[in-house]
Amino acid sequence: MCIGAGFEHVETYIASGNVVFASKAAPERVKAELEARLLAYAGKPVGVMLRTAAEMTAVLKANPFSKAEPKRTYAIFLDRPPRRDALDHVVGRSDEEMRLGAREIFVHYPSGMGRSKLKIPEAKVGTARNMNTIAKLVELAAKP
């Protein structure tokens, strides 16, 4: 799909929709192109969260839970900045810790994401990646 769209240096990482590539097109155009191709492929809308290499590096550096296990710490990627009161509306909170980012919501799941009952309405249309995955994507994006 990405090669067909004219992107270069295309590399995927694990089977969860992560792809690193180069494009000279504006981010809005890249997002629209990918969403159109995914719609044609899947027959239903599939949202795309797009970040530049610099933005992914910034997310990794902005992790407010850097001392926690990377596999239990996530950034939920959003299309726009989260509302300031986004964390006031969560339900099912147990031992999770949350912080707002630029266009992300950071969540530390001490007991594991799979056991959590946490629901963050603001993140309904977001996609989450743990810090290990984000670090690997940053590494792939840094390749020449």
Image (cartoon, helix red, strand yellow):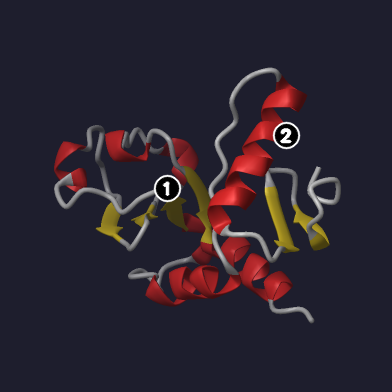
| Residue that appears at 46% across and 44% down | 113
The number of discs equals 2
Place of residue 40 in the rendered image (x, y in percent of width and height, measured from the top left): 73, 24
Splitting the image into 4 quarters, where does residue 64 fall?
bottom left
Q: Quadrant of residue 119?
A: top left
Residue at 30% of width from left, 39% of height from top? Answer: 122
The mark that comes first in sequence, 2 or 1, is 2
Helix, strand, or loop for circle 1? loop
How dense is the environment of label 1, judged by Cα within 10 Å: few (below 14), some, or many (20 and up)? Answer: some
The type of residue carrying mark 2 is Arg
Q: Which mark is residue 37?
A: 2
The furthest residue to the top: 43
Q: Nearer the viewer, mark 2 or mark 1?
A: 2
In this view, 98 is above or below 31: below
Q: Quadrant of the N terminus?
A: top right
Tag 2–tag 1 contact (CB < 8 Å): no
Picture residue at 63% right of the left edge, 36% below the top: 35
Task: Name the side, left or right, on which 69 lies relative to 53.
Answer: left
Q: Disc 2 versus disc 1: distance between alpha carbons?
A: 19 Å
The residue that disc 1 covers is 79
Return the residue nearer the eye: 43 or 64. Answer: 43
Q: Is residue 27 visible?
A: yes
| Camera-side residue of 18 and 119 | 18
Query: Which x, y percent locates residue 73?
Result: 44, 59
Image point (45%, 68%), residue name:
59
* Horizontal side of residue 119 vs 34, given as left or right: left
**Viewed as shown, does residue 140 lie left or right of 82?**
right
Q: Does residue 50 appear anywhere in the picture?
A: no
**Kind of residue indicated by mark 1:** Asp
